[in-house]
């Protein structure tokens, strides 16, 4: 990757067993740990920073905003805070980052509140190695073995849950957690604590401050713009944005509305026209999955040559953190159609409620399961068991089922590769990860953490935001919009709402990806395209960090009852 943090809990000689100093912009070293970082944003206010002095060393990698006193030297400021407060010092650092601190012979790596950057680690080389690029850390493992449970989760959900990876020997630091030479543990920043306040007013104020904090990025500024609420909010609040980009066909409803929004705010707009670049999983796109999440979410990956900005903004996770995606609402049946109500379901089954929050496609997964199991519901049973097992981790941070559903979605968020790719190619700001917004999420009861509250908030920022409605939401009322969606599907001679994203199956077939991705594996051709792309993601990622290639048909194995490992198998 273009940007990376890589370290060893050991001295410089241990570090150089695996990497050369020349690969990095800066390397900090001590007897207990050595860390290198590479980042074009190093030294820019709000971006990566490093410091070494009498108190020890500190590296902040990513995007970070300390309080005003630490603005000019954030790494030095964090080290000084750590010398006084220990791990609690990290609570004062806002942003999306990994932080390394060495002080008085101890060294620790800390994530941000929602683990928006993963820290991968392994002990296989005889010393603990860690870093942001899973492939580089995995390369230090001599004979990696694939974890069947992880393969099954990736295949059927598009995400590996919890702290696992594709390899038994490779792990992830905990959500809201830390890593030392001999320990991995949890912090207590992301804990639900509901409060009474003016929820819409507070959200509006905090969003405004979060955006202002990130308005100082250098160079030409761009925005990935959809027709939805989230990115248009940023468009209205960032007068510095010069260019917007939307993936899709020029005559698509989503693109037309995005174009009108850009015109409304006097910003240039480019349509990144859908073709094989939209779906083709190239080497970098697969690398950005880190082998734990599918690449399909990186919609813009094939269009780098068409994007001419230095800084790129996006609205990723606004729906999850600020609009209640992940909650389970009560529903009712109307003419065979299930419609959601505003009211939260009192006692939802957390497993069933979580199924729709990931890439589990029951009918298509059933076709995949037919390749290896006689039980037609083998895939569904596997997914339910995987979610149930992982869901237990949520109860230490909340006692509410609805909050636990949100936490489960946040901590296993499948769309993160979207920002990983952006951050690797541009100066990127993850606005939803702002500490003030995360605190709003934690303090707001689920019944107020809704799209309705979000709309009231952004109306306070700019009432003109709704001049052009999202094409699939013609009314402010979700119920009325859903009823029109139903009517459009059923009535003759009436055009249905178009989906926000292009038809992936259509594109997959049009550009003959079976022959381009799996020319020697005709049995793979029979599977649904989403699952074929997941297989390619896993095979491609393993190829980047292991000398042995994986046979694509091997990843169809489901986990064995004893949870045993499979050796990586060479492709014939």
Image (tube, rainbow, N blue to C red):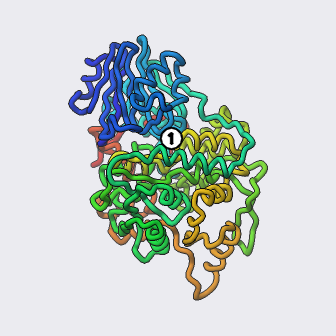
- Quadrant in the picture for residue 193: top right
**View extreme (bottom): residue:** 493
- Quadrant in the picture for residue 121: top left
The front one of 249 and 289 is 249
Mark 1 Cα within 10 Å, few/some/many (few <14, many 20+)? many
Q: Would residue 460 appear left or right of 6 to someone viewing this image?
A: right
Position of residue 431 measured from the top left corner of the image (x, y, whole percent): 50, 47
The image shows residue 266, relative to residue 198, as above or below, that is below
- Quadrant in the picture for residue 454: bottom right
Position of residue 530 measured from the top left corner of the image (x, y, whole percent): 45, 59
What is the count of numbered marks?
1
Name the secondary structure under disc 1: helix
Rendered residue at 37%/26% (across/down): 129
Q: Would residue 453 appear left or right of 26 to someone viewing this image?
A: right
Q: Which residue is mark 1?
A: 149
Q: Would residue 18 appear left or right of 123 to someone viewing this image?
A: left
Position of residue 373 measured from the top left corner of the image (x, y, whole percent): 53, 52
**View extreme (top): residue:** 104
Q: Can the viewer see residue 206?
A: yes
Rendered residue at 37%/32% (across/down): 131
Q: Can the viewer see residue 288?
A: no
The front one of 195 and 296 is 195
The image shows residue 464, relative to residue 484, as above or below, that is above
The image shows residue 386, relative to residue 99, as above or below, that is below
Rendered residue at 37%/20% (across/down): 57
């Amino acid at each position: 990757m273009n940007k990376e943090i890589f370290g060893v809990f050991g001295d410089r000689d241990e570090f150089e067993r695996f990497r050369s100093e020349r690969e990095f912009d800066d390397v900090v070293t001590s007897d207990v740990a050595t860390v290198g970082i590479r980042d074009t944003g190093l030294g820019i206010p709000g971006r990566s920073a490093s410091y070494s002095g009498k108190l020890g060393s500190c590296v902040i990698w990513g995007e970070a905003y300390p309080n005003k006193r630490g603005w000019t030297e954030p790494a030095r400021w964090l080290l000084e805070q750590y010398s006084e407060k220990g791990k609690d010092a990290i609570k004062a650092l806002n942003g999306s980052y990994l932080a390394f601190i060495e002080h008085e012979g101890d060294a620790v790596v800390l994530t941000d509140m929602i683990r928006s950057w993963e820290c991968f680690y392994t002990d296989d080389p005889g010393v603990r190695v860690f870093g942001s690029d899973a492939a580089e850390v995995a390369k230090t493992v001599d004979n990696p073995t694939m974890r069947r449970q992880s393969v099954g989760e990736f295949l059927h959900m598009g995400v590996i849950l919890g702290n696992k990876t594709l390899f038994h020997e490779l792990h992830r630091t905990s959500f809201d957690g830390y890593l030392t030479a001999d320990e991995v543990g949890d912090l207590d920043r992301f804990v639900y604590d509901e409060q009474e306040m003016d929820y819409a007013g507070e959200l509006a104020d905090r969003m405004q401050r979060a955006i202002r904090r990130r308005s100082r990025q250098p160079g030409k500024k761009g925005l990935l713009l959809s027709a939805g609420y989230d990115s248009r909010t940023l468009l209205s609040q960032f007068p510095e944005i010069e260019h917007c980009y939307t993936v899709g066909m020029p005559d698509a409803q989503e693109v037309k509305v995005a174009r009108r929004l850009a015109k409304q705010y006097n910003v240039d707009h480019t349509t990144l026209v859908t073709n094989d670049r939209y779906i083709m999983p190239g080497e970098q796109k697969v690398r950005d999955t880190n082998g734990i999440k599918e690449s399909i979410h990186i919609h813009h990956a094939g269009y780098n040559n068409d994007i001419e900005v230095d800084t790129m903004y996006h609205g990723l996770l606004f729906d999850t953190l600020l609009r209640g995606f992940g909650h389970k609402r009560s529903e009712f049946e109307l003419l065979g159609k299930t419609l959601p109500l505003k009211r939260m379901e009192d006692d939802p089954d957390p497993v069933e409620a979580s199924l729709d929050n990931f890439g589990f496609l029951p009918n298509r997964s059933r076709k995949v399961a037919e390749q290896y199991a006689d039980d037609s519901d083998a895939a569904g049973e596997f997914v339910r068991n995987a979610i149930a097992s992982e869901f237990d981790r949520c109860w230490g941070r909340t006692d509410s089922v609805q909050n636990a559903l949100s936490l489960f979605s946040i901590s296993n968020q499948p769309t993160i590769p979207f920002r990983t790719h952006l951050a690797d190619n541009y100066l990127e700001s993850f606005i939803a990860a702002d500490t003030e917004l995360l605190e709003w999420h934690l303090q707001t009861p689920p019944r107020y953490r809704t799209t309705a509250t979000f709309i009231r908030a952004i109306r306070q920022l700019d009432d003109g935001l709704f001049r052009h409605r999202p094409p699939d939401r013609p009314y402010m009322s979700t119920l009325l919009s859903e009823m029109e969606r139903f009517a459009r599907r059923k009535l003759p001679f009436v055009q249905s709402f178009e989906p926000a994203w292009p038809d992936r199956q259509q594109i997959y077939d049009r550009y003959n990806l079976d022959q381009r991705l799996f020319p020697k594996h005709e049995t793979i051709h029979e599977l649904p395209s989403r699952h074929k792309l997941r297989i390619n993601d896993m095979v491609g990622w393993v190829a980047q960090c292991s000398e042995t290639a994986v046979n694509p048909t091997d990843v169809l194995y489901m986990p064995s009852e004893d949870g045993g490992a499979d050796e990586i198998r060479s492709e014939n």
